[in-house]
Image: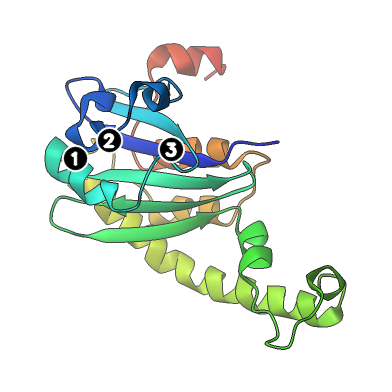
Amino acid sequence: MGFSGHLVFARSDRPLLEAPVFGNLDEELKATVHTGESRPGGWQMLQFDAGTWDDSDLPSLVEWSGAPACVAEVSDSSLALVTGLDSVGGRWQAWLNLDIAARLLAEEPEDLEDQLLWLDTPEFHDAVRHKRAELDAEIPTDAESAVAWAAAAGTSVTPQPAKIEELLRSHETFAEDLFSRLLDELGFPRPRSADARDGG
């Protein structure tokens, strides 16, 4: 079983879990929240199990931190939907592990009776190819929006849209790893010690 839940990435001088938006979590739930790798500049990541984070929490977090933030909604570690928001309401979304997302989002026939049988049909594979092409066509816009979001976050390195597009078309066994690579490409460097461990 992979991880299902949310990876929340935001900036704060204090521990991110102290943000008021998390004030309604009871101590038992707070104990299940994992702190991910922090990055220079006060950028932190929190890992919430499924059902703990709500989509409406993102605007509240951005308002409190005064900086852009993003969240990856991960499903069984196999795919993720990333949503970013800046402090003036600019919003973007992108799928990670596009092929799996296309299988999930492929349009089913209205008269579908047995989903398992449907997954074995040529029509299903055609629907997946069609959805994959739709999602792929959105990638350049998604990449440009992600780069604009990173610029609003004040990253010191200007991300390359072409590299973001390449990453959004790539595949990793764990969607969490792809999210971490996306943050790298968007100009949020990992601590030097992490680079050293990775052999970089």
Residue 33 relative to residue 25: left or right: right
In front: label 1 or label 2: 2
Q: Amino acid at mark 2?
A: Ala
Q: Image point 43% across, 66% down: which residue? A: 140
- Give the answer, above or below, for where 9 lies relative to 200: below
Q: Secondary structure at mark 3?
A: strand
**27 vs 88: above or below:** above
Secondary structure state at the residue bearing disc 2: strand
Provide the residue designation for mark 1: 154
Tell me the residue that label 2 is attached to: 10
Residue 107, given in percent of the width and then of the height, sits at 64, 79
The amino acid pointed to by label 1 is Gly
Taking the image as drawn, is residue 22 in sight? yes
- Give the percent coordinates (x, y) of residue 128: 70, 73
CB under 8 Å between callouts 1 and 2? no
Circle 3 is placed at which residue position? Answer: 7
Q: CA distance from mark 1 to mark 2?
A: 13 Å
